[in-house]
Amino acid sequence: AQSVTQLDSQVPVFEEAPVELRCNYSSSVSVYLFWYVQYPNQGLQLLLKYLSGSTLVKGINGFEAEFNKSQTSFHLRKPSVHISDTAEYFCAVSERGSQGNLIFGKGTKLSVKP
Amino acid sequence: KAGVTQTPRYLIKTRGQQVTLSCSPISGHRSVSWYQQTPGQGLQFLFEYFSETQRNKGNFPGRFSGRQFSNSRSEMNVSTLELGDSALYLCASSPIAGAVYEQYFGPGTRLTVT
C-alpha cells in the first residue's frame, strides 16, 4: 500500500535562509507526486506536481522539488524563504492507474523567523 | 473562473446530531472528492463522486455519506455525530474522474462537535 512520510513535523528557519522539506513515499508502482501548502484557516493550494518527464519540478512562489525514484523521495526546496512562507506543507502521492485519490503525509510546519 | 466553494465555512453541532456540508465545484468540473483533516489522523480521503455516482470510497464508517447532483454540486452528510468528527472537511474538484493531477481544493468547512 502506498504511504507518505514527511520526516520533519516542524522546521524553523530564518528569513532569507534556504529550506528543504523532506518527503519519502512508498509505492510498488509509478506515482504522481504533489506538494501542497495550507495557510491558517484555509484550504490546500497546489505548489507543484510531478507527473512525468524532468525530475526537477518548479512551482509557484519560488519553490522546486526533485523526484528521486531510487530513493523514493520528493523533497521540496526554496533557496531563500520569506516570512510569508510560514505555513504547513503537505506532500501527497497518487498511484498511476489507481482510483485516483491522494495519500497525504502528516505535514511539515514551516516557521520563518525575522 | 470561480474556484471551489464550500458552505458553510464554520459549523458547530452537538454529539448525536447530523450535518450536511455542501461543495460547488469549478465550472465544468464533474468530479468532486471529499477529505477529512484532523490533527491526529491528518488528511484522509472520504469519497469521490462523478456523474452522480460514488466511484471511490475511503475507510470511513457508514455514518459518512455523500451525493452529487446533476449540476455536479456535492453534499456530504455525517449522521450521529461523534466528538471525533470534529475536523476540517475539504472538497476538491477535477474535470474528470480520478484526475488528481488537475484537482483544486476549496477553503473547507470547519466542523466542531460538542
Image (tube, coloured by chain):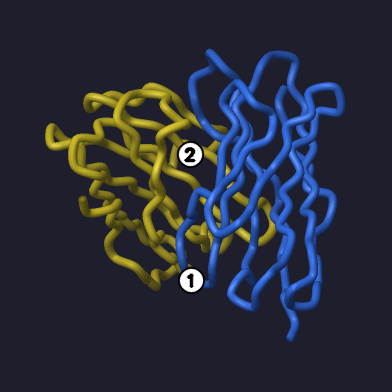
Numbered circle sitting on residue A41 = 1
Residue A94 position, x and y percent, is 59, 28
- Residue at the image position 57 percent from the left and 43 percent from the top: B44
Q: Position of residue A29 (x, y in %)?
A: 69, 14
Using the rendered view, name the quadrant where residue A111 is placed. Answer: bottom right
- Chain drawn blue, letter? A
Q: From the viewer's perspective, is B32 left or right of B83?
A: left
Q: Amino acid at mark 1?
A: Asn
How many marks are shown on the rendered structure?
2
Mark 2 nearby-residue class (10 Å; few <14, some 14–19, many ≥20): many
Q: Determine which residue is flagged by label 2.
A: B46
Residue at the image point whose x is 34% and y is 48% from the top? B77
Vertical relation: B67 (above or below) A8: above
- Supply the letter of whichever chain is yellow: B
Nearest the eye: A2 or A62 = A62
> Which amino acid type is shown beneath numbered disc 2?
Leu
Judged left or right of residue A40, residue B14 is: left
Label 1, label 2: how far apart the Cα atoms are: 20 Å
In percent of width and height, residue A101 lies at 51, 30
Frontmost residue, A84 versus B45: A84
Residue drawn where x is 76% and y is 44% of the image:
A75
Image-based side of A92 in relation to A40, left or right: right
Tag in front: 1 or 2? 1
> Relative to A102, does residue A80 appear above or below in the rendering?
below
Q: Which residue is more in the foreground, B7 or A61?
A: A61
Q: Quadrant of residue A18?
A: bottom right
The chain carrying label 2 is B
The chain ID associated with circle 1 is: A
Q: Is A55 left or right of B14, judged from the image as shown?
A: right
Secondary element at tag 1: loop
Mark 1 surroundings within 10 Å by alpha-carbon count, few (fewer than 14), some (14 through 19), many (20 or more): few
Query: Within the image, what quadrant is residue A33 found in?
Result: top right
